[in-house]
Amino acid sequence: MRGVAGGSSFLERAPSPALAPLVSSVWVQQVGDAPIRQRYVPHGGAELRCVLGEAPRLLGPLTSATHRVIPAGGVVVGVRVRPGALGGLAGLPAGELVDEDLTTGLLWGDEARLTDLLGGAPSPQVALDRLQGFLARRGEETDPLVDEVVRRLMPWRAGVLPAGWGISDRQLRRRCHAAAGVGPKELQRLLRFRGFTARVQAAVDRGEPGDLAGWAVEVGYHDQAHLTRECRRLACVTPGVFLAQYREACGGADDHDHTAAYLPMLRRRGHRPGHGRSVQEPPARPA
């Protein structure tokens, strides 16, 4: 990968077909000759990541930004778990994993075997393939009701849950907490911010200027002030600073590719933001 010697590379892509029902994207990150402080922001799902040679770790659903240091020369393989899929994948209620960062040995045991399996891979891509295979064998059926909740709360939709699910509000919250870690209202907040993050990533990738006011309304905020409050709460910075920091880290770098993460979040009925051609609405599954 180009550019690794002085900085870092981050290449994200779609998961393997076997893992697609549970995972929205996977990545390989390579760090150059200096450690980096990586920021993780809430997106409604979870992340399983492994610095090769170290124990894999699960970062549960976040309710505010957090940072982790990746050592110089580190190679990271990771997967982004879809909102609502964590409960089945982890084998315990996702609500117990909110804002947690723990080794996979606490979930599935046999931590040393998985660490050696990934660390002994001949290339980062092989390590990522092995991680995907490991997860595909442990994935369980997702809760179809929560899948539908996630689908209806995506930024390209109206973001309003209909009445008459056939269960009480309390049962709905319980099932959302078990599968996604949070209730429907908080899940909507996280998915809306994920939509804003996608607009930032797309604009930087395409070299477009920022349009914070337009993006705010596009992804479901009342106005830019609403976006600012939520961005401070979830990312701990203002939207302008968030955009500037992302542009500094990834702008103009052809060894940073987050297309697989942001493109599904930009799809809307009849059009894609920033494009004039029509597209089909995405299939009825969570992103």
Image: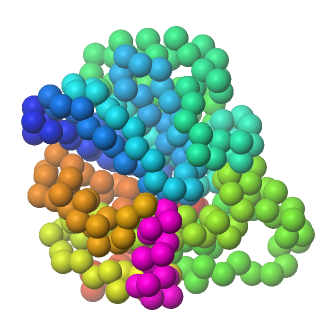
Q: Is residue 269 visible?
A: no
Q: Is residue 4 visible?
A: yes
Q: Position of residue 83 (x, y in %)?
A: 59, 55
Tell me if 167 is positioned left or right of 75 in this view.
Answer: right
Tell me if 285 is positioned left or right of 141 in this view.
Answer: left
Residue nearest the observer in this picture, 221 or 281: 221
What's the magenta region? 221-234
Q: Quadrant of the N terminus?
A: top left
Q: Main secondary structure of the magenta part?
A: helix
Residue 101's image quarter? top right
Q: Residue placed at 60% from the left, 70% from the top?
A: 188
Q: Residue placed at 79% from the left, 62% from the top?
A: 173
Q: Does the magenta segment cover residue 196?
A: no
Q: Position of residue 199 (x, y in %)?
A: 34, 71
Q: Does the magenta segment cover residue 232?
A: yes
Q: Position of residue 161 (x, y in %)?
A: 71, 78
Residue nearest the observer in this picture, 246 or 87: 246
Residue 44 vertical placement versus 153 (above, below):
above
Q: Position of residue 166 (x, y in %)?
A: 88, 71
Tell me if 254 is positioned left or right of 225 in this view.
Answer: left
